């Protein structure tokens, strides 16, 4: 919950108190929310009760008690205390995605790897699809026999050589993992309607954001909640997708998931600017959004690597 979110929550609490006729005062357009001053507690504080005390004809602490009762049930707030003459002090509930973003940024491309298939020795058949299956199996702890050159023991990729010669390695592998009626032109198109380009471009965009942020003098740090539930949910799903793709030997499952992550990243990118605009200074919101973008890039790069497809930093 951001300070702006908390301000709106406080205003809603005032409105509810007025509607329930436990407080007779004008509903403010906004409530000033700041870091607690000396003697305060928690993450944020507001003086709204002091502002409403006069119009309500009540002591400020009594107004604060009324508002605390309205705010106690909010899941995003873990505690509300009253200090001094009537300041409301808020302790926010932990952001459930804080650990997720930090974990991804720490583990990088290994995020989602596990030991679900540890102790099992599994063979695969021939071809680029089998190579992707082998990488997925190993990422879940399985042992997959290797040849002398380090690849899976799957022999030559029958029929794939001509496709690679025509489309290039990455587009050829993608087309083998997700067979469609797409033409060669569709598979090579540098536009967002092409799923392969969309996924690789999303990764390249995350890397560009990090470079541009450095030029503006700030780095990523997940300091406050980011309003991107679709993207965060897709990132949280990644370990389960990897395990399912390995168990079922379905690398196409991972390819589709990466496309979903890319799509949700662009929605987030378009609605929540990661970089300051104009004269705007970098804030906690920008640092947190950049941390989410970097986590997204790590998931996309790691997933593409498992599929045997490159993740360039520039497109």
Image (tube, rainbow, N blue to C red):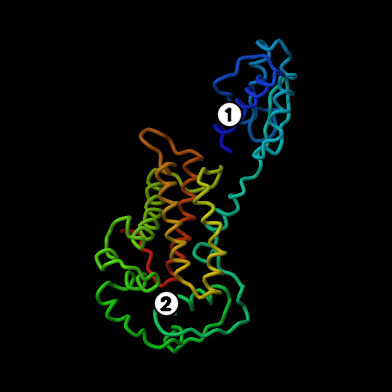
Mark 1 and mark 2 residues within 8 Å of each other at the beta carbon: no
Answer with the quarter of the image where residue 71 lies.
Answer: top right
Callout 1: helix, strand or loop? Answer: helix
Instruction: Please indicate whether residue 39 sits to the left or right of residue 269 in the image.
Output: right
- The C terminus lies in quadrant: bottom left
Which comes before the other along the chain, label 1 or label 2?
1
Up/down of 173 relative to 206, above or below: below
Callout 2: helix, strand or loop? Answer: helix
Residue 101 % position (x, y): 55, 53
Residue 74 % position (x, y): 67, 36
Up/down of 32 relative to 309, above or below: above
Residue 276 % position (x, y): 40, 39
Tell me what residue is drawn at x 60 percent, y 18 percent: 27
Instruction: Please indicate whether residue 66 sits to the left or right of residue 170 in the image.
Output: right
- The N terminus lies in quadrant: top right
- Depth-wise, is mark 1 or mark 2 nearer the camera? 2
Tell me what residue is drawn at x 43 percent, y 44 percent: 274
Packing grade of label 2 (10 A; few <14, some 14-19, many >=20) is many
Up/down of 306 relative to 53, above or below: below
Answer with the quarter of the image where residue 9 lies.
Answer: top right
Up/down of 213 relative to 314, above or below: above
Residue 129 % position (x, y): 42, 77
Instruction: Please indicate whether residue 29 sits to the left or right of residue 47 in the image.
Output: left
Packing grade of label 1 (10 A; few <14, some 14-19, many >=20) is many
Tell me what residue is drawn at x 48 percent, y 46 percent: 289
Q: Nearer the viewer, residue 12 or 57?
A: 12
Quote the CA–CA distance across marks 1 and 2: 52 Å
Q: Mark 1 points at which residue?
A: 7
Q: Nearer the viewer, residue 119 or 47?
A: 119
Looking at the rendered structure, which numbered label has been put on residue 225?
none
Q: Mark 2 points at which residue?
A: 129
Answer with the quarter of the image where residue 184 lies.
Answer: bottom left
């Amino acid at each position: 919950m951001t300070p702006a979110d908390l301000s709106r929550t406080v205003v809603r609490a005032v409105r509810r108190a007025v509607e329930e006729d436990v407080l007779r005062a004008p509903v403010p357009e906004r409530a000033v929310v700041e870091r607690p001053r000396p003697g305060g507690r928690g993450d944020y504080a507001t003086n709204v009760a002091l502002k409403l005390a006069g119009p309500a004809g009540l002591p400020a602490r009594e107004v604060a008690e009324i508002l605390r009762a309205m705010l106690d049930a909010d899941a995003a707030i873990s505690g509300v205390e009253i200090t001094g003459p009537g300041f409301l002090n808020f302790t926010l509930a932990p952001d459930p995605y804080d650990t997720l973003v930090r974990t991804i940024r720490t583990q990088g491309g290994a995020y989602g790897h596990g030991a679900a298939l540890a102790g099992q020795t599994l063979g695969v058949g021939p071809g680029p699809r089998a190579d992707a299956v082998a990488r997925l199996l190993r990422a879940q702890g399985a042992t997959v026999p290797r040849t002398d050159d380090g690849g899976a023991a799957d022999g030559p990729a029958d029929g794939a050589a001509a496709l690679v010669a025509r489309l290039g390695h990455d587009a050829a592998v993608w087309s083998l993992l997700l067979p469609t009626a797409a033409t060669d032109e569709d598979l090579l198109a540098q536009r967002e309607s092409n799923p392969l380009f969309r996924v690789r471009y999303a990764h390249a965009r995350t890397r560009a954001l990090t470079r541009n942020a450095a030029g503006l003098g700030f780095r990523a740090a997940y300091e406050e909640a980011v309003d991107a539930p679709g993207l965060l949910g897709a990132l949280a799903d990644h370990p389960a997708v990897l395990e399912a793709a390995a168990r079922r030997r379905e690398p196409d499952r991972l390819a589709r998931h990466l496309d979903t992550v890319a799509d949700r990243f662009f929605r987030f990118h378009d609605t929540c600017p990661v970089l300051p605009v104009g004269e705007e200074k970098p804030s906690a919101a920008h640092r947190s959004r950049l941390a989410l973008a970097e986590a997204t890039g790590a998931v996309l790069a790691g997933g593409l690597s498992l599929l045997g497809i490159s993740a360039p930093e520039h497109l």
